[in-house]
Image (cartoon, rainbow, N blue to C red):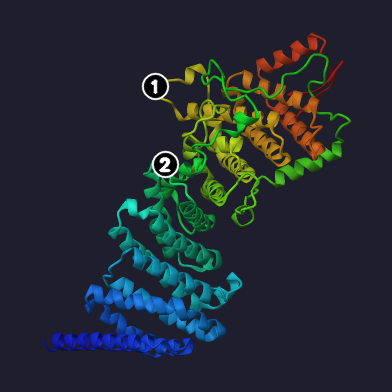
Amino acid sequence: MLNEGNSALMSSSAVKSWRTAFLTLRDENSASPPRATVVRLLDKLILSQSHSLVAAAPQLPPHELTSDFMLLLELVRDHLSYYQQGIEDATQTFVKLSALIHGICHSSSLEMNSTMWALVCDSFKRVVQVFLGNVETEMAIVRNAALIKPTKDFLESLRLLFSLYQTSASPLKMVSRGACEVLTVAFAMVGEVYSRVGASLPVEIWKSTVVVCPEKVMDILASKSILMEDNTVAKFYVELLQCLHLVLAEPRGYLAEHVAGFVASLRIFFRCGLVNKPSVMNQQTNHMKGVGSTSQNIPFEVSNQPKSGQAALIASTLTKKVAGNQQSRHEENLASSRHEFISSDSDCSDNDGSVIDNSKAYLAKARLAAIICVQDLSRADPKLFTAQWTMLLPSNDVLQYRKYDTTLMSCFLSDPSLKVRIAAASTIMAMLDGPASVSLQVAELKEHSRHGSFTTLSSSLGHILMQLHSGTLHVIKHETSDRLLALSFKILMLLIASTPYSRMPPELLSRVISSLQSTVEQGFPYHNDRNSLLAAAIICLTRALSVSPSMHVNNMLLGEISAGLLHVSCFVLDMNGLVAVSLFSN
């Protein structure tokens, strides 16, 4: 009984201290004192006794606690910049303030609404700007261990408050324009924290950020068939996706359980701002229709057919257009740039020639950020990510525009933003490179691989490889951008290295060779980087010829030789005993 009495007395004393502190603070603040005075009051009345105030919070009525908490956040938002003048004082204030807010959020029942949530985001943003804004490098955070714990507490507080807000708000309100304005600030703040001190945060914080902040909101967005696309909502999409990128770029734990959900949500953003926009590829060319999709009618766009009396195959010996040493140099350059990453800092800008107004600019940024997030997931676990290929890559009719079925390949082929197309190409490269190439060896696309309505994994991968060949060769034939052409050749080199051609339709490899043969023969006379592009085309052709040839390829070569279109310049036996042929026109 004595212990219970002492406990009640202590609780009563803590509540009295809380009410005295906040009533005094309200009275003093009502006279609009100078900023320095307000800061001193905060230190004296609130921060100096933060432990007792945290103990009192659970004993207060929710409406009273919420009102006082809002006053604290308002004063923090309006007067915190005063601390920028002294870093030592700012650090101590950051430590005390984060502990107080974390304690209140963790032990109490606050009444969250849109007004309260907006104030939370605005004040937390100011805290990040003031306290972490003084830190120029991540190493400074590491050296100042005192900042790690309060940063963790602020992120944990944000997670708890977001959970309360999510419980009080319906999914419809969560994606309303008013809520989006607030969430934009929230995700910008979290992104700022991760960009500065992400590597120093505990793994538990990283996990909770993945689960509660981006994933919950992404799930809500994924449940909507069509995204809102005005300027306010578009800004929210950009901050959400850039925050997700910063969280995923350097994963601190295992992402396997989250990957499928993220991919399903991110895929929706591929068409963001494009649903009512005609396909760029249809505007530039008329090569998107009339392409088959079954193994009997191979969905394959042959880039260029060889012409009679012209150069056909150039493999082991280069033509006079490109010297041998230049080929070697370009091959090294192409190999070294396979892991090229499209930085959100350098490419998420308003200076995109394809956008007209701010809304379109932000929607293009959202598409770009979503693709970069997919690339982050792919790089985190390339072998595991192969299971998501059917969600992200086409299995049929790659050259036919589909408004509501957007894939990475359709982004690469037809997005109106050059930056988005470059990001899509780089992401496809990331998916094809590394351990994923081993998984592709099970791919197969033959008549006997079909089992009624059931599609095996090997068959699905086979269809995807066919479409990747088709789309890539289409870009090589029609593209005007040197950058995209260079990326297309890199993709094609990865495809040639990864595709088990013996398990694919026999005409696939011969069509690749024929297409590259014609590309090399025509060259790139209207491109500034014509020599580099020609070297890349020759390298691709060389690698295609190094593949163990099928009977279809042999018959094609022998047919052209016997028809007098080609004569053999030399035969070279490679290490596997296969014949690499250098052929020239008569």
Which quarter shows the C terminus?
top right
The residue sitting at 89% across, 30% down in the picture is 320
**Is residue 220 something one can see in this rendering?**
yes
Above or below for 116 versus 51: above
Q: Amino acid at mark 1?
A: Ser
Q: Viewed as shown, does residue 2 lie left or right of 24?
A: left
The residue identified by callout 2 is 226
SS at badge 2: loop
x and y percent of residue 179 in the render? Answer: 39, 58
x and y percent of residue 40 in the render? Answer: 44, 90
**Is residue 156 something one can see in this rendering?**
no
Question: How busy is the neighbourhood of tag 1: few (under 14 within 10 Å), some, or many (20 plus)?
Answer: few
Which quarter shows the N terminus?
bottom left
Residue 6, image quadrant: bottom left
The residue identified by callout 1 is 453
Depth check, front residue: 20 or 324: 20
Question: How busy is the neighbourhood of tag 2: few (under 14 within 10 Å), some, or many (20 plus)?
Answer: some
Question: Given this view, does label 2 or label 1 mark the residue nearer the observer?
Answer: 2
Residue 312, image quadrant: top right
Q: CA distance from mark 2 to mark 1?
A: 30 Å
Return the residue found at the far right: 320
The residue sitting at 65% across, 30% down in the picture is 284
x and y percent of residue 92 in the render? Answer: 47, 84
Depth check, front residue: 461 or 274: 274
